[in-house]
Structure formats: structure tokens, C-alpha cells
Amino acid sequence: MIPVMCIVQKGQISKYRELKLKFEICDFTQRLFSEDADIDWIEVPTGSGFTAAQPSTSLITSLQSCRSLDQSERTLLLKELHNICMNGAGRSCNEVTVAIRQAH
């Protein structure tokens, strides 16, 4: 399983979009790592997340790779994951932050 953490503010993303995004992230991890994603979907209470001193509309997604990635591959995967999250969550490019970290 590939650990993935998604953090959003409660009420920012509909259940439909949440399920769609989870499906697309699972497809991404299957294609790249031949493993399912173990998604920890975290909704912080309304008003508990801020960006630029305003209630946040952002999505933060962090994925842990099961193998070592060189920088060029990491960059390509980050761009793809960013697009998946942006489109799946219906957020602008400025509202999505993604990270891919390596297992220890």
C-alpha cells in the first residue's frame, strides 16, 4: 500500500469529488507503483485552516513513494499528481499543494 494523506477544510470538497479524487489517486499509484493507495482523508473543522489570512480552500496531498525516485521522475510525477488533485477536487492550481516523499 502507498500511504497518501489528503488534507482539506470541511465542506470544501463534495463527497462526489472526494470519491472521484480517491479513485484517481488509486489509479495513479497502481500505474506507477503497482500498489493501491491507502488514503487518509483529513477534514479540518471549518475555520481551522487559513491561507493568506483567509479561510483555506486548499487541498494538500502528500504521497509516500515505495521506491527511490530521481529528480526528473519526481518532477513528472508531481506534475501529474498535481493535475489529478486539481481536476479531481475542482481547485485552481494555486489551491493545490502536492508532495512525494520517499520511504526511509
Image: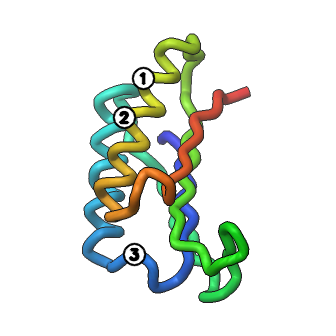
Q: Residues within 10 Å of mark 2 (few under 14, many from 20)?
A: some
- The three-letter amino acid code for the residue at tag 2 is Glu
Circles 2 and 1: CB atoms closer than 8 Å: yes
Residue drawn at point x = 35 percent, y = 43 percent: 83
Tell me which numbered mark, 2 or 3, is placed earlier along the sequence. 3
Residue drawn at point x = 50 percent, y = 40 percent: 2
Residue 102 vertical placement versus 17 (above, below): above
Q: CA distance from mark 2 to mark 1?
A: 6 Å
Residue drawn at point x = 56 percent, y = 56 percent: 60
Res. 80 mark: 2
Q: In the visual, does 55 lie left or right of 93? A: right
Residue 18 vertical placement versus 61 (above, below): below
Identify the image quadrant of the C terminus: top right
Residue drawn at point x = 47 percent, y = 16 percent: 73
- The three-letter amino acid code for the residue at tag 3 is Ile
- How far from the left and from the top, in percent, is residue 26? 34, 46
The quadrant in which residue 70 appears is top right
Q: CA distance from mark 1 to mark 3?
A: 26 Å
The quadrant in which residue 87 appears is bottom left
Res. 37 mark: none
**Quick one: 101 or 85, which is closer to the camera?**
85
Q: Which residue is mark 3?
A: 13
- The three-letter amino acid code for the residue at tag 1 is Leu
Q: Check disc 3 and report its element: helix, strand or loop.
A: loop
Q: Which residue is mark 1?
A: 76
Q: Check disc 1 and report its element: helix, strand or loop.
A: helix
